[in-house]
Every structure is written in structure tokens, then in C-alpha cells.
Amino acid sequence: MGQKILIVDDEEMIRDLLMDIMDTLDLQNTAVSNGQIALETIATDPEIGLVILDMNMPVMDGRDCYHQLRITYPTLRVILSSGMDQDETERQFKPDPNLFFIQKPYSLAKISEMIRSALTI
């Protein structure tokens, strides 16, 4: 897996904001609007090494997308992004050293720190 970041969020404003953040961090990135498109994108782009995945989306939500990713790409790093309480979100997933959580809304500093942490494991 590479260092390219895939942003998966149904809100265009958030996708654009995250893409701008990635650009300021000089990180390659691409963005899609749901989990189904994310799975298709990852299957065709081996450079993707990190996924920032929104939990609540139409077509395929973050939970279903994450579980599909784990079947095919068990070591792919994933940051789950949710407006839900972090403790509640973490209880829904098995311990995974390649899984990170960030609660919305998040600051530029917090998401930047989370991305750096996820890319250096």
C-alpha cells in the first residue's frame, strides 16, 4: 500500500476541506462520496495507503465499507470520522492497530496530527 489518501464523505464541503488540508501537507489524495465508490477506487489504485472514512453516508456507510476493506485489505490504515461519541464508535469495532478515530467536528491541527500518526505506524 502506498501513501495516497482516499477521502470518503458524502458532504462535498468536507471532502473539499480535507483535500485542501492534504494539499497543504503535500499529500496525494482523492475523494469520493460513498463507501461503494471507495471500494471500487481502492481496487484500482494500489497507491492508497490511508482512508479517511465518514461513518454516515448513503449507498454504503462507513461501517459496511470498513468491514469490506478489512476482508480484502486487512492492513490498510483507516481513520473513521464520526459525529458520534468516540467511545461509542470504538465499541462498535474490534481492536485494530490500523484503525483510528476522529470525532466531528475536528480542527485542522487534530486531523493533521491524526493523518501523520496513521501514516507513520
Image: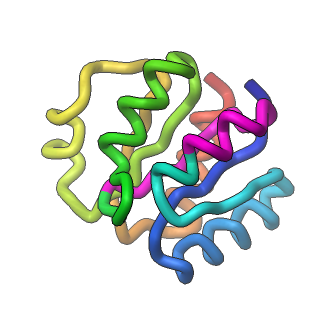
Q: Which residues are magenta?
A: 39-55
Does residue 47 appear to the left or right of 95 in the view shown?
right
Does residue 107 appear to the left or right of 94 in the view shown?
right
Report the label total.
0
Residue closer to the observer: 64 or 16? 64
Residue 81 in the image, given as x and y percentages of width and height: 39, 54
Spot the residue most to the bottom. Answer: 13
As for residue 42 lying within the magenta part, the answer is: yes
Does residue 109 appear to the left or right of 20 in the view shown?
left
Residue 116 in the image, given as x and y percentages of width and height: 65, 42
From this view, report whether residue 14 is shown above or below residue 65: below
- At a point 85% along the width and 56% down the height, the residue shown is 26
From this view, report whether residue 42 is shown above or below residue 76: below
Residue 9 in the image, given as x and y percentages of width and height: 48, 64
Residue closer to the observer: 108 or 54? 54
Q: Quadrant of residue 45?
A: top right
Residue closer to the observer: 85 or 110? 85
Q: Quadrant of residue 83?
A: bottom left
Quadrant containing the N terminus in the rendered view? top right
- At a point 77% along the width and 43% down the height, the residue shown is 4
- At a point 21% along the width and 44% down the height, the residue shown is 89
- At a point 45% along the width and 19% down the height, the residue shown is 71
Q: How is the image coloured?
A: rainbow
As for residue 48 lying within the magenta part, the answer is: yes
